[in-house]
Every structure is written in structure tokens, then in C-alpha cells.
Image (cartoon, rainbow, N blue to C red):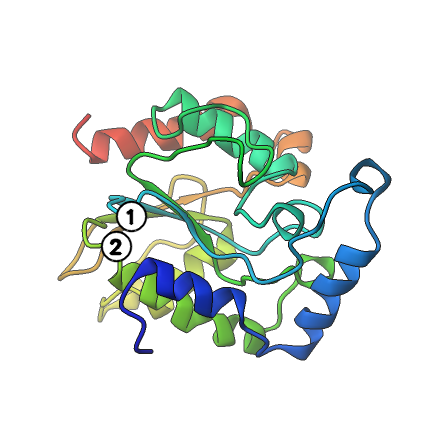
Amino acid sequence: MTVTTLEGLEKEITACRKCPRLVAWREEAGRNRRRAYRGDEYWAKPVPGFGDPYAKVLVLGLAPGAHGSNRTGRMFTGDASGDFLYPALFRAGFASQPCAKNANDGMELKNIFITALCRCVPPENKPTPIEMNNCRPYLQQEIKLLPELIGVVALGKLAYDAVVHHILTIEKMDLVPKFSHGAFIPAHEGSPWVLGSYHPSRQNTQTGRLTVEMFDQIWKQVNLLLGK
């Protein structure tokens, strides 16, 4: 990949049509809008990363939501996951406001860049291994283009495993902890540290698997790792 700026990478991502199933699904979701969003113009394209170009921490999710990021064009914006994530980032001092409605709402991130394994909304939130593999070069290039990056917060097991197997340069993988909420991998030989968290999905937050207090603890740990 020859893109050398985040702006150039964003253009390449939004023009991507590598996965026919996902192209069809994201566009179908844009046509069959929820009643609450009937008046909205859906993004219905791959969603690029978003945040501070000098971020020290990358926040990695799984994929856009059909009527969230696929509608707004900005990661974790306009759905229940974002409604849980951004207030936590605001409380921890990483976001300028607690509410994320759309790409023009004035939200600014400090020291954080938010992205995902898969840039298009997948049916049933389940991208295939081939689809995730098609998107992986975008993630790897984003990491290269974030010069101050020192850590990754992986939201969910798929994000955590992807970082472990495709981003880190660790030879003895048997020493890497399995995914759990709070699982931590120290920085190693040029690789960023990694902190695992349950994904702030509606399923996790409404069942109590992930509470506000549990999520806040993740961001408190991030601040400690940043020396704050």
C-alpha cells in the first residue's frame, strides 16, 4: 500500500469495493432505513478511522453498525455502542463531548484514534475471515501513519485476537494472555501495548456483562499507561 497520509488512506478506504457481500449489504441498509432515520442521508460506504492524528492510543472495534456508523460515516457514532463509548471517553478526558450524533457534531478526540477491523457493516455483525483479511491492510497502514502510537484498546475478542496475531511482534505466543476484560499485553520490541475490553455493544451493556464502572476502569488504566 503506497498511501502516505491519513487523508489519502481515508479516500482509499471509502472507495473500497473488495467484498461484494458487504457492498450489497451496506447499500441495502442505506436504502431500507429505520423509521427514526427516514430523513437521513446514509453514508452506506466503508467507514474510515477517526480521531487525533497524533494519537497515542488506537481504539479497535469490529465493524460499523447498520444504522450507526453506516448511517453517519463515523466510527461508533449514532448507535448504542457509541452512546456507551463516547461518554466514557469524555469522562476520561479523551473526547470533547459525551454525545456523538453525526460526523458534523463537533466531536474532537485527544490522544485517541478510533477504527475497526472491518470497514463495512456485515450481515448479523459477522464479517467472514476473508472480509476481515481484505480490510487488514487498512488497519496496518493506519498504525504506520500514527507516529505517536504506543497502545491499543481492543474492544471484543475478535479485535483482541486480530491485534495479537497480525500486529504484534511476539515470538512466544503461548505467553500472551487470552482475551478477557482487562487482559493486558505490555509493549514489546516495537509493538504497542494491548488492553482488552468487552465490546460496548447493547448486548453486553444491557445484560450487565459490561457496566459503566468496568468500562471506566479501562480508560483509567489507559490514562495510567499514558502517565496521567
Label 2 crowding class (10 Å Cα cut-off): few <14, some 14-19, many 20+? some
Task: Give the amino acid type for the residue marked by disc 1 in the picture.
Answer: Pro
Image coordinates of residue 160 in percent, x first then y, are 42, 55
Image coordinates of residue 121 in percent, x first then y, are 65, 59
Write the residue at 74% across / 66% down.
25
Write the residue at 46% across / 26% down.
88
Looking at the image, residue 183 sits to the left or right of residue 82; the answer is left
Residue 129, placed above or below residue 210:
below
Q: Which mark is residue 190?
A: none
Label 1 element class? loop
Looking at the image, residue 90 sits to the left or right of residue 100; the answer is left
Residue 98 seen in render: yes
Image coordinates of residue 100 in percent, x first then y, are 55, 32
Residue 20, quarter of the rendered image:
bottom right
Image coordinates of residue 26 in percent, x first then y, are 70, 62
Residue 223, quarter of the rendered image:
top left
Task: Give the amino acid type for the residue marked by disc 2 in the picture.
Answer: Leu
Q: Dividing the image into 4 quarters, which one contains the N terminus? A: bottom left
Residue 185 seen in render: no
Label 2 element class? loop
Label 1 crowding class (10 Å Cα cut-off): few <14, some 14-19, many 20+? some
Per the model, the C-alpha gap separating discs 2 and 1 is 6 Å
Q: Which mark is residue 53?
A: 1
Give the number of callouts. Answer: 2
Residue 26, placed above or below residue 43:
below
Looking at the image, residue 146 sits to the left or right of residue 60; the answer is left
Q: Earlier in the sequence, mark 2 or mark 1?
A: 1
Write the residue at 82% across / 42% down.
38
Q: Are the residues flagged by discs 2 and 1 in contact, CB closer than 8 Å?
A: yes
Residue 182, placed above or below residue 127:
above
Identify the residue position indicated by label 2 in the image. 146
